[in-house]
Amino acid sequence: MIFSSLEFLCVFLPLVFLLHCLIPDLLVRNGLLIAASLIFYAYGEPRYVILMVVSALLNYLAARMIDAFVHKKLVLALDVFLNLGLLVFFKYMSFLLDTFSQVSGMRFRAVEIALPVGISFFTFQALSYVIDVYRGKAKVQKSFCKVLLYISFFPQLIAGPIVKYREIDRFLSERRIEVGLAADGMRRFICGLGKKVLIANTMGQVADAVFAAEAFRINLPAAWIGAVSYMMQIYFDFSGYSDMAIGLGKMFGFQFEENFRYPYGACSVKEFWQRWHISLSTWFKEYLYIPLGGNRRGKVRTAVNKLIVFFSTGIWHGANWTFVLWGLYHGFFSVLEEHIPFRKRIPRPIGYLCTMLIVCIGFVLFRADTISQGLFVIGQMFTGSIKDPAGLSFVTQQLTPWFCVMLLAALALMAPVKPLVLRVQSICQQEGGGGACVRLLHLALDLGSIALLLWCMIRLSGNTYNPFIYFRF
C-alpha cells in the first residue's frame, strides 16, 4: 500500500519539498527526487521497486545502443519485446491462462501474480523514450540517473499522466524554483485532492453500493444512479490525480501537459477522446495508430486501425473482458461517427446528449465485474421497474444530502471553471486598479485552497484509505 494520504500530506511531501527548495545544486536535487521516488514506491511495493529500476536500466541501455550501434531496428524490437513481455507476465498471465483454459478445456493451476502498481504507466513512458530516440525525436540521455528520475518521478509514477521524455528533458538538466509557480502548483494540487476526497470518494461509495447490490434491488432509478455516480467518480478520481501530479510537478520545477480538458463537454466520441486521458490517447495515436497506417490507406483500413487502437486501449486498462468490450464499444462508435453523412449538421445539444449517453453506458461496462453484470445494469437503465418497494428503498438510502450536494458540485465542475477564473483575472487586469483586483483574487484563491486542504484532511482522518482507481492500471 502506498503512503496513507495523511502521511503523504503531513510528512513525506512537506519534507521532500522543503529539502528540494533548500538544496542549491541541481544534481543533488535530482538525487533527492530519485531517492524520494524510490522510497515512495518501495513503501507500498518493496518487492517491485527493483523491477522498476531494472526497467529503467533496460531502456537506458537500449537507447544508448540505438544511438551507438548500426542495428537500431533490432535493438528497438528487442526492447519493445522485453518491455511488453514484462507487462504481459505481471498483468495478463493469469487472464491469458484462464481464457485458454476456458477455450481449450484444459486445466491450469491458478497463477497468482501481484500486480506492480503503475506498471502500465511506467512501461509506456519508458517505451516512448526509446522509440523517440530511435526516431530521432529525442536525444539519447547519457546519465542513467536522469532516465531513472524521468521514469520514477513520484508525482506521476503511479497513475500518470504518461510523460514523453522530450517534454521534460530540459527540466531534468535546468530548472528553477519560482515562488509563483510553486504557489500555483500547490493550489492545483489541493484542487485535485478536493476532487478526489470530496467528490470522487462520495460518488464511489454510491457506485460501489449499486454494483454490489442484489439484482432485485437494482431498478431503473438505482441503475441510473449507479451509472452516473461511477461516471462522476472515475472522472473526478482520475482528473483529480492528474491535477495533483501536474501541481506537484510545478512545485518541483517541472511542467507536465494537461491530461483532461473537460471531456464531459464533448459533443462526439472523437472529441471525448481528444479531451479524456490525453496522454494515453496521444500515446496510442503516435506509437500505434500512425505506424499501422493511420487514415492513409483507405476507409476500411482506417476503421480496422481504430478498432485495434481501441482494443489496445481497453486491454491496457486491465486483464478483464469488460475492459476489452469497453474499448471495442468506443471503437465502434468512433468508426460509426465517421460514416454518418449528416454528422456535421447534427445540432450540438443533440450531439452532446448522445455522446454523454454513449460514455455513460460505456463506463457501466468498465465498472462491472463481469460482462453479464454490465449488460444487466444497462438493461435496467432502460427497462427496469420504477415502482418496486425494495428498489425504491435502496434508492432512497443512496440519496443522502451529502451525496446530492456533491453530485451538484460534480455537475458544476464538469464545466470549464479554470478558463472562467482566468477570464476574471484578465478583466481585472484590463480595468483600472487591476493590480489590486488581481491580488484580491489570488488572496481569495489562496484562502479557499487552505480551507479546502483542511476540509480534505478532516475527511481523510475519518475515512479508511481509498486508493485512486488508476492505481491498479
Image (cartoon, helix red, strand yellow):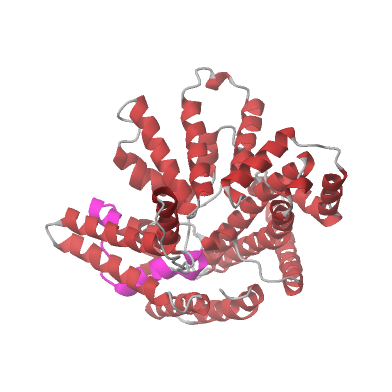
Task: Give percent across and percent down for residue 407.
Answer: 76, 49
In the displayed structure, 406 sits above or below 29; it is above
Which of the 4 image quarters holds residue 397? Answer: bottom right
Q: What secondary structure do most residues of the magenta stretch adopt? A: helix
Task: Give percent across and percent down for residue 335.
Answer: 46, 30
Which of the 4 image quarters holds residue 146? Answer: bottom left
Task: Give percent across and percent down for residue 190.
Answer: 65, 64
| Quarter of the rendering occupied by the N terminus | bottom right
* 1 or 405: nearer the viewer: 1
Looking at the rendering, the stretch of residues picked out in magenta corresponds to 131-158
Give the left or right position of residue 446, taking residue 263 as reference: right
Which of the 4 image quarters holds residue 69? Answer: bottom left
Question: Does the rendering let one see residue 370?
Answer: yes
Give the left or right position of residue 395, taking residue 367 as reference: right
- Identify the residue at horizontal 42%, vertical 47% (top origin): 312
* 368 or 187: nearer the viewer: 368
Question: Does the rendering let one see residue 174?
Answer: no
Task: Give percent across and percent down for residue 352.
Answer: 63, 32
- Identify the residue at horizontal 44%, vertical 64% (top origin): 119
- Residue sticking out furthest to the left: 70
Q: Does the magenta stretch include residue 151?
A: yes
- Identify the residue at horizontal 52%, vertical 78% (top origin): 21
In the displayed structure, 139 sits above or below 44; it is above
Q: Does the magenta stretch include residue 69?
A: no
Give the left or right position of residue 385, taking residue 304 as reference: right
* 70 or 191: nearer the viewer: 70
- Identify the residue at horizontal 55%, vertical 80% (top origin): 18
Q: How many labels does the image show?
A: 0
